[in-house]
Image: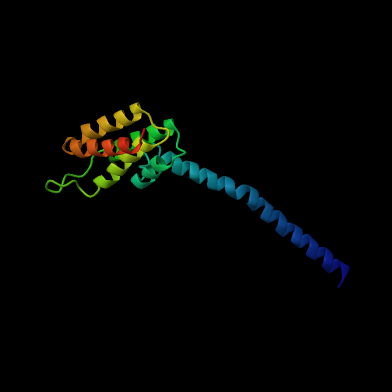
Amino acid sequence: MEPELIIKSIMGLIAVLAVLIFFLFFEPSKGSKTQKKADDNNVGEEIKPDLIFLKNIVKNKKTDEEKLGETLDLIIKYYGAIDKKVGIKPHPNFDIYADILFTICKHPHTNKNIIIKFDRELEKLNPEYKKEINEAIAKGLNSRGT
């Protein structure tokens, strides 16, 4: 090959490389600006966590006392109202709440204040489930042993 053609090819590759480097460094900043604009549009909106996700946090034995309390507050805030009873039987969704009650009673990082607060707030929002809530807590506390 001619040396002149090799030099032109190398210069062309350097130019292409410079353009690619330019896009590498300046394209993400445009993305972050659009992300920031999207975040600004959602400032007033809260993201509602999933009940199953919150339940899994409660079931995790490594969840500390503070995180457990925060998670239970979110459950009350977003999912505190249980569906109405079907006749005299609890709604099938109550099983999730019974499981949460049972789990917080057995959780290694729980305390009486967490249990009582969750119990009272759940009963206040769902007075027709008072008996079932008390039964779930009794089962949980009895399963703890001595």
The N terminus - image quarter: bottom right
Quarter occupied by residue 102? top left
**What residue do we see at 75% from left, 61% from top?**
13
Residue 9 position in % (x across, y down) = 79, 65
* Figure label count: 0
Residue 12 position in % (x across, y down) = 75, 62
Q: In this view, does 12 lie above or below 31?
A: below
Camera-side residue: 35 or 86? 86
Quarter occupied by residue 51? top left
Outermost residue on the front side: it is 146
Outermost residue on the right side: it is 3
Q: 77 left or right of 36? A: left
Residue 95 position in % (x across, y down) = 26, 47
The C terminus - image quarter: top left
Outermost residue on the bottom side: it is 1
Camera-side residue: 37 or 9? 37
Which colour assignment does the render follow?
rainbow
**What residue do we see at 23% from left, 50% from top?**
92
Q: 54 left or right of 13? A: left
**What residue do we see at 71% from left, 54% from top?**
18
Q: Is residue 61 above or below residue 22?
A: above
Quarter occupied by residue 65? top left
Q: Is residue 43 above or below residue 13?
A: above
